[in-house]
Amino acid sequence: MNLKPLGDRLLVKPIEQEEQTATGIFLPETAKEKPQQGKVEAAGPGSRKEDGERIAMDVAVGDKVLYAKYAGTSIKLEGQEFLILKESDVLAIVQD
C-alpha cells in the first residue's frame, strides 16, 4: 500500500466485532456496533509547532488503538476498509 498520512493523521484498519458472542449467540449484521478498535497501518510525521518543529506522535505503526465511535474518514483501498484519523481521535492504545 502506497499511502502516507500527513501531519498528525493515522491510517487505521478497523477490527470488526465478532460474529458470535461469548455465550454462543450469533449477531446479525444490523445488531453489530460500529468498530471502535483498529490497528495502525501507517502514521504521519506529526503536527508542527508554531516555530515549525515537529511534535512526535504518541501512536506508532502496529499499535492497536481505541478511537472515538464516529471519528475519522472511511476510505476503501485495495478492497479493504480503512479510516484516516487525527491522533486526537485516538482515545487509548490497547495493550494485550
Image: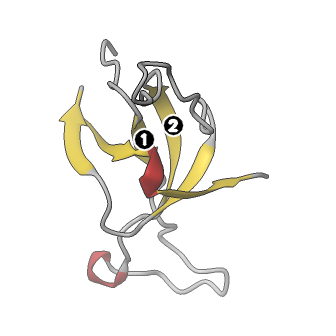
**Residue extending furthest toward the front:** 51
Instruction: Identify the residue at horizontal 60%, vertical 38% (top origin).
Output: 59
**Mark 1: amino acid:** Val
In the rendered image, the vertical position of residue 49 relative to residue 24, given as above or below: above
Estimate how packed mark 2 is, as few (under 14), some (14 to 19) or many (20 or more) residues with alpha carbons within 10 Å: many
Percent from the top left, x then y, of residue 83?
32, 45
Given the current orientation, which residue lies at the most extreme top position? 2
Where residue 25 sits in the image (x, y, percent)? 53, 86
Residue 66 lies in quadrant: bottom right
Q: CA distance from mark 2 to mark 1?
A: 4 Å
Quick one: label 2 or label 1, which is nearer the N terminus? 1
Viewed as shown, does residue 57 lie left or right of 10? right
Q: Are marks 2 and 1 in contact (CB under 8 Å)?
A: yes
Residue located beneath label 2 in the image: 40
- Residue that carries the numbered disc 1 in the rendered image: 12
Q: Position of residue 8 (x, y in %)?
A: 41, 34
Amino acid carrying label 2: it is Val
- The x and y percentages for residue 94 are 69, 55
Element type at mark 1: strand
Residue 11: quadrant of the picture? top left
- Identified at 24% across, 26% down, the residue is 78
Q: Residues within 10 Å of mark 1 (few under 14, many from 20)?
A: many
Q: In the structure shown, which secondary structural element does the residue marked by tag 2 occupy?
A: strand
